[in-house]
Image: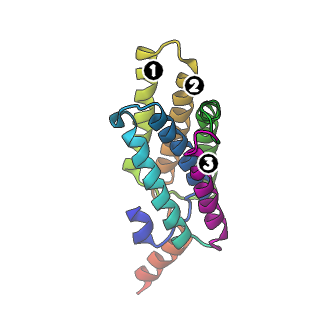
Amino acid sequence: MMKIVSNKSAEGISMLALFLEVINYSVSVVHNLRHNNPLIAWAETLNLTFQNIVLMVLVMVYGKGNMLPGTVMFVAYAGMLFVMQDEQAFTSEYLSIAFAGGTMLTVAARGIQIAAIQSAGHAQNLSFATVALQFGGSVARVFTTIHEMPDDTDMLFAFGAASLLNGVILLQLIYFWNAKAPEVAAKDAEKKTQ
């Protein structure tokens, strides 16, 4: 977040990827609330939800283009939350289906982010620490799942896919380490000529 604000640019950050992650995390939060799971088990997911919402706002403020797509996403998200809080409209069966679909949302979100980084030709607005921690956390969850729930292939697949794609983003960050956004490179060149 600080990199986006200091660079005054959200280039290379995909609004759609953030939106898909917010939906996925929100479904997980609702799932945990409905099952009365202890907050300690899902507090990180709630925190990530809020962080991604702030990132979406920053992408709207510092991104190039109009704000309509982001505004539509926020309206859709508010509608989704309204429906999800109603247990009669969004039954446990629907919640289970949505929770299972989270893996596909994660894969889609990471795939979109990978494409956005590749298209931008830099990853200057991503935090190395955050990406490295996401990768490390998803790898740790793979091993925890193997150890604690060896028969839960759905969970293992979800964390395995997240690990793989987070690893690709980490490799992109390393590959594009010295690459800069075109406007930043132009400013740097201008400073050198002065």
Depth check, front residue: 154 or 1: 154
Task: Say if residue 54 shows up in the picture.
Answer: yes
Q: Which residue is mark 3?
A: 83
Q: Which residue is mark 1?
A: 145
Question: Mark 2 and mark 3: span between their CA atoms?
Answer: 28 Å
Q: Is residue 69 magenta?
A: yes
Q: Amino acid at mark 2?
A: Phe
Secondary element at tag 1: helix
Disc 2 crowd rating (10 Å Cα; few below 14, some 14-19, many 20+) is: some
Quadrant, the N terminus: bottom left
Disc 1 vs disc 3: Cβ atoms closer than 8 Å? no
Q: Residue furthest left?
A: 40
**Which numbered disc covers residue 157?**
2
| Horizontal and vertical percent position of residue 67 | 62, 72
**Predominant secondary structure in magenta?**
helix
Task: Say if residue 124 shows up in the picture.
Answer: no
Q: Amino acid at mark 1?
A: Thr
**Which numbered disc covers residue 170?**
none
What's the coloring here? rainbow
Foreground label between 2 and 3: 3
Q: Amino acid at mark 3?
A: Val
Secondary element at tag 2: helix
Where are the magenta residues, as a range? 65-88
| Horizontal and vertical percent position of residue 91 | 62, 35
Sequence-first tag of 1 and 3:
3
| Horizontal and vertical percent position of residue 166 | 51, 40
Q: Is residue 29 magenta?
A: no
Disc 1 crowd rating (10 Å Cα; few below 14, some 14-19, many 20+) is: some
Question: Mark 1 and mark 2: span between their CA atoms?
Answer: 10 Å
Residue in view at x 58 percent, y 57 percent: 78
Sequence-first tag of 1 and 2:
1
